[in-house]
Image (cartoon, rainbow, N blue to C red):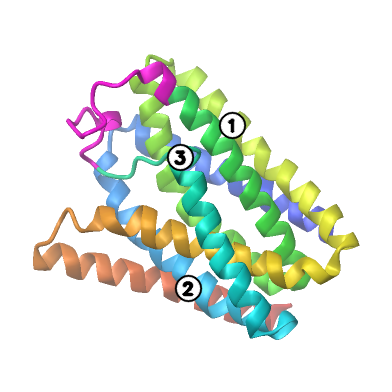
């Protein structure tokens, strides 16, 4: 099977899987599952970025270039978030879950539009990252896809709930999320053809991919876990983060030995 076919299958399967799981959780009214999924996603993102993507990038391009790409990437994602392109809702206390957060009371129609724009862009970037990882190494592609799917699920749940809260029907909310998922495949196609021609850019792209994963894990997801400070919750969160890291290590080991 060609690398392009593998990339397209991975992005399509990942988009559909995260969307279906998100719809099941959102429609069965179990938003309290979201913090559990978030803790696991943090582990998967940290594990993939620090144990797989960054070491591979350094091996291909040297520490200096990758460090610059990582630094530039973190600043870029910070800027994008400031432009309200990255819009997440992972916490139980949030407008999507009927809570009274500091966002409560703003225009829900605009909120739904911003989510759609932000999600489309985010998925497009994810597609480029997945393509870049598979072009370097099959094992790296599988591990990267796992981490991206893990963080897509709680994100999709939050987005789905906000769209419902904004007055969208379940069918329309599902359709909007499905269309934003198509952006992952578009990003993957673009990433594949661009990187096939510009192989020298691969270490830089991997540095940006690691920056994206670290930024989402540490800036976007991790702060939400501090809302529950009791020891039992903290231990549960640590265990789930560890499980996320362990999944990445296990998948990397199994794929490395089986391919």
Residue 102's place in the image compared with 184, above or below, is: above
Place residue 100 in its image quadrant.
top left
- Describe the element under mark 3 as helix, strand or loop: helix
Counting other residues with Cα less than 10 Å from the Cα at mark 2, is it few (<14), some (14-19), or many (20 or more)?
A: many
Q: Is residue 143 visible?
A: no
Q: Is residue 171 left or right of residue 226?
A: right
Based on the picture, tell me whether residue 172 belongs to the magenta stretch.
no
Instruction: Using the image as rendered, state which of residue 163 and residue 9 is in the foreground.
Output: 163
Q: Could you tell me which residue is drawn at 67 percent across and 77 percent down?
A: 65
Q: Give the number of marks.
A: 3
Give the quadrant of the N terminus: bottom right
Viewer-nearest of labels 1 and 2?
2
Residue 189 % position (x, y) = 79, 48
Q: Is residue 37 visible?
A: yes
Can you tell which mark lies on residue 156?
Answer: 3
Instruction: State the separation of the CA atoms marked 2 and 3.
Output: 21 Å
Q: Could you tell me which residue is drawn at 24 percent across and 57 percent down?
A: 225
Instruction: State the separation of the CA atoms marked 1 and 3.
Output: 10 Å
Residue 174 % position (x, y) = 51, 26
């Amino acid at each position: 099977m060609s690398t392009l076919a593998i990339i397209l299958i991975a992005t399509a399967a990942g988009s559909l899987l995260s969307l279906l799981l998100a719809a099941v959780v959102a429609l069965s009214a179990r938003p309290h599952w979201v913090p559990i999924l978030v803790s696991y996603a943090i582990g998967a993102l940290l594990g993939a970025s620090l144990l797989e993507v960054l070491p591979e990038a350094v091996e291909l391009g040297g520490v200096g270039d990758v460090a610059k790409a990582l630094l530039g990437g973190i600043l870029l994602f910070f800027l994008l978030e400031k432009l309200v392109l990255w819009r997440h809702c992972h916490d139980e206390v949030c407008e999507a879950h009927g809570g009274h957060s500091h966002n409560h009371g703003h225009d829900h129609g605009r909120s739904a539009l911003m989510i759609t724009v932000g999600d489309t862009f985010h998925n497009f970037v994810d597609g480029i990252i997945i393509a870049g990882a598979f072009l370097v190494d099959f094992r790296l592609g599988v591990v990267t896809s796992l981490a991206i799917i893990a963080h897509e699920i709680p994100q999709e749940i939050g987005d789905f709930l906000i769209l419902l809260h904004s007055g969208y029907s379940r069918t329309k909310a599902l359709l909007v999320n499905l269309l934003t998922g198509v952006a992952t495949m578009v990003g993957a196609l673009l990433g594949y053809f661009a990187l096939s021609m510009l192989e020298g850019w691969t270490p830089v792209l991997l540095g940006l991919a690691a920056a994206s994963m670290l930024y989402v894990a540490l800036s976007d997801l991790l702060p939400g876990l501090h809302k529950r400070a009791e020891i039992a919750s903290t231990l549960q969160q640590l265990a789930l983060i560890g499980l996320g890291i362990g999944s990445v290590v296990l998948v990397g080991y199994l794929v490395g030995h089986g391919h």
